[in-house]
Amino acid sequence: MPMKKKTENNAVRVSKKPKAKQSLRKVTMKKSLPAAKNTLTKPVSAKRQFHLGIHLLIAGSAIAVLILLGIVDRVTFSTLRSRASESMPITIGLEHRNPLSVSLVIARKNEVGYASILSGSDEQIRISVPSEWKRVEVSGAPLSAFAQDIPAIGYTRWTLPPGAGIKMTLDDVPSSLFFESASASTTEINLRTIDLKGLPETETQVILLKDRALATLWGSDEE
């Protein structure tokens, strides 16, 4: 009889040990799961931060070039939200009485387009541009002095005071510009293009406009 009691006690002892081990295993597995999740998420977030930093660096360097060239300031360039693309030639119309000198800058950076128009005349002039060109800044006169006609046939006519300028964003970056003038006087157009697709490239053309004239942009694209 004493032997039976010992074997029963031993059986009880043996059966309790596996249960204790199983419960310990369950606890350790539950505790290890959160640590595994953390190790998976950390590399992903670090990778995203690295790519974001590279994109900001590239964008910042391109903006700095325009600022150094004196073409656009930080506030103006920060408003460039349009997704522009290259398009067919567009027409720009000019209306004036006396001989006129106009400075025109067209800049592009990837899919963003920008235009700056400055009148060198001592008289009021009118200029017609595509309605998609959105005004972002004026200079040389109060904002109220810049009259805007109701858009017609896809174009908007702006009235510029003497010696005033206007800056715009472009929905489409033109491949060339076709100028038209209804004036009997000659118009001198100082055209400057700034290409920031790769290394910054600038090109200057002087166009003497009498009735009509065509200016090709981004000549390197055709090579």
Image (cartoon, rainbow, N blue to C red):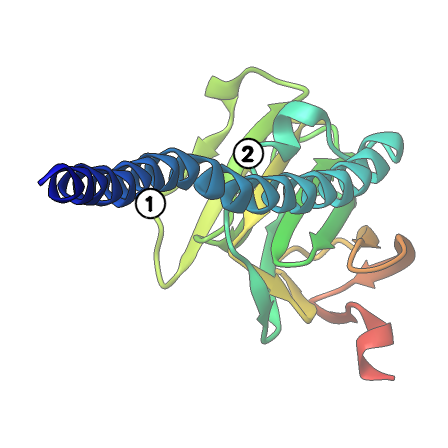
Q: What residue type is labelled 2?
A: Thr
User: Measuring 58% from the left and 76% from the top, which residue is drawn there?
Assistant: 88
- Is 138 positioned to the left or the right of 143 in the image? right
The relative height of residue 109 versus residue 1 in the rendered view (above or below) is: below
On the image, the x and y values in percent for residue 60 come to 75, 36
Badge 2 marks a residue whose secondary structure is loop
Task: Look at mark 2 in the image and give the residue it sits on.
Answer: 79
Task: Give the image quarter of residue 56.
Answer: top right
The extreme front residue here reads 1
Circle 2 Cα neighbour tier, 10 Å, few/some/many (<14 / 14–19 / ≥20): few
In the image: residue 34, left or right of residue 20:
right
Disc 2 from disc 1: Cα separation = 23 Å
Give residue 29's position: percent from left, percent from top.
37, 42
- Report the quarter where the C terminus lies: bottom right
| Left or right placement of residue 188 versus residue 159 in this view | right
Q: Which of 19/41 is in front?
A: 19
Instruction: Say which residue label 1 marks.
Output: 150
Q: In which quarter of the image is the N terminus?
A: top left
Res 79 → quadrant: top right
Residue at (27%, 36%) from the top-left corner? 20
Nearer to us in this view, 48 or 130: 48
Residue 17 place in picture, x, y as percent: 29, 39
* Label 1 crowd (10 A; few <14 / some 14-19 / many >=20): few
What label does residue 207 carry, if any? none
Please give the name of the residue rendered at 58% of the width and 28% of the height, measured from the top-left corner: 137
Amino acid type indicated by mark 1? Ile
